[in-house]
Amino acid sequence: MKNLFISLFFLILILIPETSYSQAEDVLSHNTSLFEQVAQIAPISINPYTSVFVTAACSKAGFHNDFVSTHPFYNNWFVLILFGVLFLFTLIVRPVMATNQLTGTLVKVDNWLENKAGIVINALVILLPIFITKTPQDSEIVYQAGFISISFKAFLILILSTYVLFVIMTVRLFIDFLIFLSPIPFMDSALQIIKIVLSGILVVVSIVSPITSVVITVILFLISLIVFRRVKRLINRVTYFIVYPILNLFRKKESLLFNNNEVSILVFLKENTSKFKKGSLLRLTKQSDQLFLVNSRFLFGKKEEKIQFSSSANVLQAHFKTTISDQHLIVILNRSYHKYIDDIASHLNIKVSNKVETQLSTEDGLLSRVKQMFKKEDITQLKDI
């Protein structure tokens, strides 16, 4: 509820016209470009690649409003071609791969990366026109960082729109993951097609009636905000045990186990602690021979909890995960750490009770290695973690 009030406060602050407060018509007229900007959030939140491709295609085809037709991002042939390729990927490759749960793990990685891309796309949509065509006037309040200068109002729009987009896309990703874990065949493939169609429809709405698109965005945001906290645990589970192991195939041992020459391992918290809730993704760090659970929070600094493993602590390794358990603390490691378990146990000064040998051939392709990493039983087991 606190986040909701903060978001509404910023929205009101942004929408207040700079020269007039008397008429609702003045507000709408003054903020026409703002509505056209925010109107892009709804289609981006559903499918960023489709949203950009369809918007750019409409711009080049002459079906646009002033915002889209003059925007340096949408009115660009390179963007049209690049996102056209990404659109074909989402239209053809994703649904095919999603028909199988094991190859569907790669689709979930792509969905997760697409969420990150959506945040970047939103920032480009808001900031690119400012950097190319506008320099803040001397009378404006600006944020300056090197050669970058941005008005206070544009900064608020960027922060608020990023937060709104993040919340909506997180819940959308939750639906993706929920269907991925369901035993119903072809549901994941159907969802990919539905997102493409829905995103395309929302693009048309954003061009024809930006205000309607903004209303849709606000409704999506409010619904998503209500369930946001409840969906985080499932998001964390699939991200940690499915997405990260695949991405970590391209990372070296030093980046997985250390940060600034100190032990720093990403763990999944199985049970509540005094400061953190179960299902959290935390860093298990070792600083001057002391162990901490650390959560680095954007804009709010680090939250830490000092821990200590007793002599009864042990490491229990299985094909899908590794469990480090003590009397009052249970954390789980994903498959990325399997071959480094002896090093981890040594750094944490705990014993390994059970160890499995799982070697992936570096000569195999990505798809073959992913199939070796996961079994169908692992997906079932993921629901119970």
Image (cartoon, grey):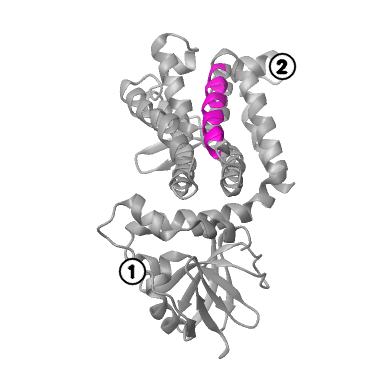
Judge left or right: residue 36 versus residue 335.
right
* Marker disc for residue 24: 2
Tag 1: amino acid = Glu
Q: Tag 1, which secondary structure?
A: helix
Does 325 appear above or below 51?
Answer: below
Disc 1 to disc 2, how far (Cα)?
A: 58 Å
Residue 109 in view of the camera? yes
Tag 2: amino acid = Ala
Find out whether residue 195 is within the magenta segment. Answer: yes
Q: Which residues are magenta?
A: 188-204
Residue 186 position in % (x across, y down): 55, 37
Residue at mark 1: 254
Of 193 and 147, which appears nearest the observer?
Answer: 193
Find out whether residue 323 is within the magenta segment. Answer: no
Does 238 appear above or below 119?
Answer: below
| Quadrant where the C terminus is found in the figure | bottom right
Does 87 appear above or below 6?
Answer: above
Residue 137 in view of the camera? no
Mark 2 neighbour density, 10 Å: few (under 14) some (14–19) many (20 or more): few
Of 217 and 176, which appears nearest the observer?
Answer: 176
Res. 300 image quadrant: bottom right
Question: At 67% across and 31% down in the image, what residue appears?
Answer: 218
Judge left or right: residue 279 versus residue 262.
right
Res. 251 image quadrant: bottom left
Residue 67 position in % (x across, y down): 48, 17
Nearer to us of marks 1 and 2 is 1
Residue 73 position in % (x across, y down): 39, 25
Does 155 appear above or below 301?
Answer: above
